[in-house]
Image (spheres, grey):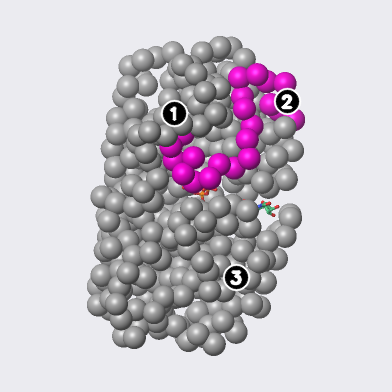
Amino acid sequence: MKKIMLVFGTRPEAIKMCPLVKELRNREGIAVSVCVTGQHRGLLDGVLDAFGVKPDYDFSLMREGQTLFDITVNILNRIKAVLVESSPDIVLVHGDTSTAFAAALACFYERIDVGHIEAGLRTYDIYSPYPEEFNRQAISLIAKYSFAPTEAARDNLLREGREPSHVFVTGNTAIDALATTVRSDYTHPLLEWVGDRRLVLLTAHRRENLGAPLRSMLRAIRRVSEEYDDIRVIYPVHPNPAVRGVANEIFGGCKGVRLTEPLDVLDFHNILARSFMVLTDSGGIQEEAPALGKPVLVMRDTTERPEGISAGTIKLVGTDEENIYSSFCRLLNDKEAYEAMARASNPYGDGHAAERIADILYDKVK
Ligand code: UD1
Ligand code: UDP
């Protein structure tokens, strides 16, 4: 029996790891265990419930206002005993969070093999996104097997000297998740509020944007929403108090913008599928929106997901108020510019990434 443990702790990791948990649990000859750090709490639990995944271990680490030190140190302190007790043949981590980095580091200390899901994304600036770019580069040094979502991600890994026979292009499990969530008969009170106006979906949470950049991003959106009565902005606000305070301050009294609690993944995917366009600094949404043909203005200076830019669906607009304001207005006014971006294109695979990863693990893990 091969023993495979998956470790994750935040919303985006859960959305992309749950399809793999389910796939691995369907295979004979593999014993699967799930360890969640609880780096996120409410956000994580919503996803676990949506996919019906029950963790075997849960560290419940989240504290309000947690620092990168808190997360990393607390995971290292808790995970050693779990690794020793369950002695997995391989541990799978995802992407670039502090959970993924600390879990990979712990495996290295215990000399346990690591498989890295969504490997090879790069900006090559360790401060953007911060700390994610450092985390994913560090995980690549540790990982024995790298599961790259695209050819471009694989090329990055090969250029960095990773062993070619241990790097696999699988697609992104985000597309697997979309296939199970988006429904044609979906309704939601927020969609009724939007009515026949154009729906703009907004999210923002990146650490490097907290403070002045976040203020200028949101100010630009407020200005546009006050000038265009035919749009409605839905903004599920990340629970980070540093985000909530600014969101309430900038959008207070603004009738075209509805602030909500974070949406369950099923609601978010379906509302995304019905949106006119998206403004975000999120990583995962840059993968989902191209698959659904939704133009995305990415409020960051760099992206590790150039595939959406090549496909024409994504545009980097930075965090400057004027730049976001003018790019946003252009998409609302210029039908041709909008149509050029609104072409469905899916650089992230066919929705069978989890199957591919499971097949490879079945062959490789001894
Ligand atoms: C983390 C990841 C980031 C990922 C993001 C997805 C790191 C360093 N960052 O950033 O890569 O894009 O998750 O959302 O790993 N909070 C709650 N409830 C929750 C979740 C968060 O209240 O369910 C609040 C807490 O006050 C917490 C704060 O949000 O202190 C920030 O959470 P944290 O995990 O530290 O950072 P994120 O910005 O969410
Ligand atoms: N998402 C969600 N509800 C929300 C906002 C986002 O389910 O209210 C999903 C979204 O579809 C994507 C993931 O969360 O799959 C992205 O998470 P986030 O932006 O927090 O993190 P990132 O991808 O930037 O690491």
In the displayed structure, would residue 340 be above or below residue 351? Answer: above
Q: What residue did someone put label 3 on?
A: 58
Q: Amino acid at mark 3?
A: Asp
Q: What residue did someone put label 1 on?
A: 275
Label of residue 252 in the image: 2
Work out how far the residue at label 2 is from the one at label 1, CA to CA, in angstroms. 23 Å
Q: Which of the pair 315/272 is nearer the observer?
A: 272
Indicate which label's residue lies in the foreground, 3 or 2: 3
Q: Earlier in the sequence, mark 2 or mark 1?
A: 2
Q: Which of the pair 120/36 is nearer the observer?
A: 36
In the displayed structure, would residue 219 be above or below residue 22? Answer: above
Q: Amino acid at mark 1?
A: Ser
Work out how far the residue at label 3 is from the one at label 2, CA to CA, in angstroms. 37 Å
Q: Residue at x 62, y 61 (%)?
A: 39
Q: In the rendered image, is residue 257 in sight? A: yes
Magenta-colored span: 249-272
Q: Are marks 3 and 1 in contact (CB under 8 Å)?
A: no
Q: Amino acid at mark 2?
A: Gly
Q: Is mark 3 within 8 Å of ligand 1?
A: no
Q: Are marks 2 and 1 in contact (CB under 8 Å)?
A: no
Label 1 Cα crowd, 10 Å radius (few <14 / some 14-19 / many 20+): many
On the image, the x and y values in percent for residue 254 come to 68, 20
From the viewer's perspective, tell me whether residue 172 is left or right of residue 280.
left
Label 3 Cα crowd, 10 Å radius (few <14 / some 14-19 / many 20+): some
Q: Earlier in the sequence, mark 3 or mark 1?
A: 3
Q: In the rendered image, is residue 157 in sight? A: no
Q: Mark 2: which secondary structure?
A: loop
Q: Mark 1: which secondary structure?
A: loop
Label of residue 340 in the image: none
Q: Quadrant of residue 222?
A: top right
On the image, the x and y values in percent for residue 257 come to 61, 24
